[in-house]
Image (spheres, helix red, strand yellow):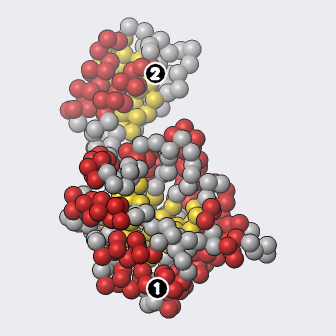
Amino acid sequence: MSTKTNKVVLHGPKSDVIIGGGQPVVVQTMLNMKPGDITGNIEQAKRCVDNGCEVIRFSVPNEEALVTLESLVKKIDIPVVADIHFDSKMAIESAKRGAAKIRINPGNIGGLEKTAEVVDVCKRNNCAIRIGVNAGSLDKKIAERQDISFPEKLCTSAMEYIIFLRDECNFSNVVVSLKAHDVNACVEANRLFANKMPSVPFHIGITEAGSAFQGLIKSGAGLGILLSEGIGDTIRISLTDDPELEVRAAWTLLSSLNLRRRGPEIISCPTCARTQVDLISIVREIEGELSKITKPVKVAIMGCVVNGPGEAADADVGVACGKGSTVLFSHGKIIRKVNESEIVFSLLEEIDNL
């Protein structure tokens, strides 16, 4: 959420989304249904929106996908980004059919001449461009260089295209991303680019991060570093899983860094020998009940009174569980005692009262 970056506007059906210029970090994900499945993609996109997605990306590999893209633009309330590889014609058609932004990869779009053709259409259709550099698809001449490090290769590739768009095409409605599955390399590449071209808004993510367990940890580590350093205007947490989980994970990360909040934050202890209730089951049940709440409420579920109201004094509401009896509290002050069998009901009731 750097104030140094320019603003890039993505035009949506109901409202625009601004990336950069000190605006809040924007949450996005990417659909993973078959490109020709119009109904499936629309339904998945709507579920992502319900979970807080603000920009949706859709891969456009062929003519069939263009038809789905058009339907998404008409049916989804948020901006739709067309993800393009190899075929500049798909980028041009996507811009014509309502995409708010075109993602192109310098390593496989076909060179600067093909990029200029895409830019020309984007100008006419008020469409932004993301220059997305990936570790696995670097331009061959840059990938083979021995005089620079791998993070420098990512940075060099991105800079070549950003400078071309700015100086040769007079086009600045641009976002950049530099991604790798290696966390340290990805962080270093983004740092390098931020030092060289700080005005360009950043989309950040750890690409090919893996399944939910590994991907969440790798993404949290890498994106947490970048966001804490002021690098990142829009994020995607890439997982081999449901896009809805990516959205929820992104909001949880932003919340943990006090950048943005959406939905409840659960404060719960890891349990120990002092715990005298089935706290894990209680936390899971509460978490499930709170999954559709969007208000940023803090809920504490503590296993004993040792770290109860004191450790979670900033919680809007919480419980400190004991054998047979539990203390219900708010902002560190005890409200009343409840029976063990009433823990979930009493906590949810108090949350409703908020």
Judged from this view, the residue extending furthest toward the right is: 146
Residue plotted at (36% across, 65% down):
63
Judged from this view, the residue extending furthest toward the front is: 63
Residue under label 1, please give it.
Answer: 116
Do callouts 2 and 1 mark residues in contact (Cβ within 8 Å)? Answer: no
Q: Is residue 136 visible?
A: yes
Locate residue 229 relative to residue 332 in the image: left or right.
right
Quadrant assignment for the C terminus: top left
- N-terminal of the pair, mark 2 or mark 1, is 1
Q: Position of residue 306 (x, y in %)?
A: 50, 22
Q: Is residue 70 above or below residue 21?
A: above
Q: Residues within 10 Å of mark 2 (few under 14, many from 20)?
A: some
Q: Is residue 198 visible?
A: no
Residue plotted at (45% across, 67% down):
84
Residue plotted at (28% across, 38% down):
292
Secondary structure found at label 2: helix
Q: Position of residue 162 (x, y in %)?
A: 53, 80
- Give residue 350's quadrant in the image: top left
Secondary structure found at label 1: helix
Specify the label residue 64 is tagged with. none
Residue under label 2, please give it.
Answer: 280
Q: Position of residue 219 (x, y in %)?
A: 55, 50
- Give residue 267's quadrant in the image: top left
- Which amino acid type is shown beneath numbered disc 1? Ala
The mark closer to the camera, 2 or 1, is 1
- Between 17 and 59, which is closer to the camera in this rendering? 59
Q: Is residue 342 above or below residue 83?
A: above
Distance, label 2 to label 1, CA atoms, is 56 Å
Residue plotted at (65% across, 54% down):
182
Q: Is residue 22 above or below residue 210?
A: below
Q: Position of residue 12 (x, y in %)?
A: 26, 67
